[in-house]
Amino acid sequence: VKEHYSDRSWQNLQTEVTKAEKVAANTDAKQSEVNEAVEKLTATIEKLVELSEKPILTLTSTDKKILEREAVAKYTL
């Protein structure tokens, strides 16, 4: 599902799918071309970047009082 992956990695997959479909539609394609298309498609699938559903927390301060105050302020907004 597209919404589960980064835009760039999904676009890369779509590009490889299009290339593989062209090879598959070519009745004169050599086995080596088919193998290469499958390998590239498989590698691209393995490189899909899943989007994280968990929020990313970045600490900008190590002062506990400041962190507590900022957390409360952001939570109440």
Image (tube, rainbow, N blue to C red):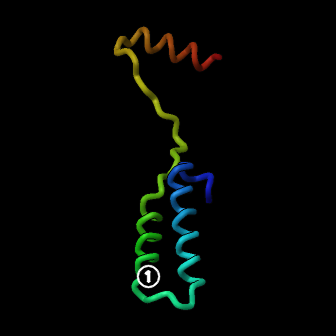
Q: Quadrant of the N terminus?
A: bottom right
Residue drawn 58% across and 69% down?
A: 18
Residue drawn 46% across and 76% down?
A: 37
Residue most toward the left?
A: 62
57 and 76: which is toward the camera: 57
58 and 44: which is toward the camera: 44
Residue 34, position as x, y percentages in the image: 46, 83
Residue 51, relative to residue 29: is it above or below? above
Residue drawn 52% across and 35% down?
A: 55
30 and 77: which is toward the camera: 30
Q: Secondary structure at mark 1?
A: helix
Residue 42, position as x, y percentages in the image: 44, 70
Q: Is residue 21 left or right of residue 34?
A: right
Q: Would you identify the image quadrant in which residue 77 lies?
A: top right
Residue 30, relative to residue 56: is it above or below? below
Residue 53, position as x, y percentages in the image: 55, 44
Q: Is residue 60 left or right of residue 77?
A: left
* Label 1 neighbour load within 10 Å: few <14, some 14-19, many 20+: some
Residue most toward the front?
A: 28
Residue bearing mark 1: 33
Residue 28, position as x, y percentages in the image: 53, 90
Residue drawn 51% across and 45% down?
A: 52
13 and 70: which is toward the camera: 13
Which kind of residue does numbered mark 1 sit on? Glu
Residue 60, relative to residue 32: is it above or below? above
